[in-house]
Image: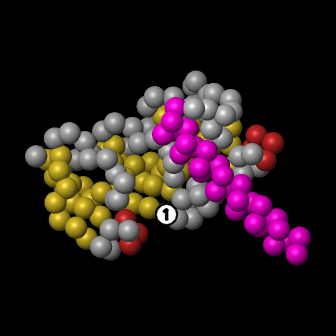
Amino acid sequence: MTRILCQLTTRLGRAAATVAVLAAALTGTTAGTASATGGWSCSGAPVPAGYVITMYNAGGCNNHGSWYQQPAQDRLWTCSGSPIVSGYVLTDYNPQGCSGVGAWFHQLVRNGIWTCPYSPIPAGYRSTTYDARGCSGLGAWLTVKV
């Protein structure tokens, strides 16, 4: 029984941490320590412009969860709820990535790249053909220059 309770608590903590990051990203509110230069920060801390979240530690910040922030770069796995920096698109998904909260593969946009659901489509590009097998089965759209 204790093992089941521990697993449930861990899963609920991860889910709460993901919701906190999404809420902070969507509302601009914070509930934690800011990290102006990246590195580890508590759940809900703002992510500096040009940075993404790449790791999650459920035991960080007194077991409230902590996230690792680093500058965006091409071909980088980021945690679900991470900001998507301008000029980047989501091209793959791993539901077990980022310590179980899910991860998206960020790439710089280019002509002929396949993008996942929820990916922004930068100005000067448009989505065309659909492939249901893309993005680990979530579906993907061919993104081409206008």
Task: Classify mark 1: helix, strand or loop.
Answer: strand
| Frontmost residue, 33 versus 136 | 33
Give the image location of residue 71, x and y in percent.
48, 34
Query: Residue at point 77% right, 61% down?
Result: 9
- The percent position of residue 33, horizontal first and vertical second, equals 68, 29
- The region drawn magenta spans 1-28
- Up the image or down, 135 lies above or below 42; here it is below
**Nearest to the observer: residue 108 or residue 118:** 118
Q: Nearer the viewer, residue 20 or 63?
A: 20
77 magenta-colored? no
Can you see residue 70? no
Amino acid carrying label 1: it is Asn
Report the residue at 44% width, 61% height from top: 93
Residue that label 1 marks: 94
Outermost residue on the right side: it is 2
How many numbered circles does the render carry?
A: 1
The residue at 79%/47% (across/down) is: 63
The extreme top residue here reads 36
Say left or right for 63 vs 57: right
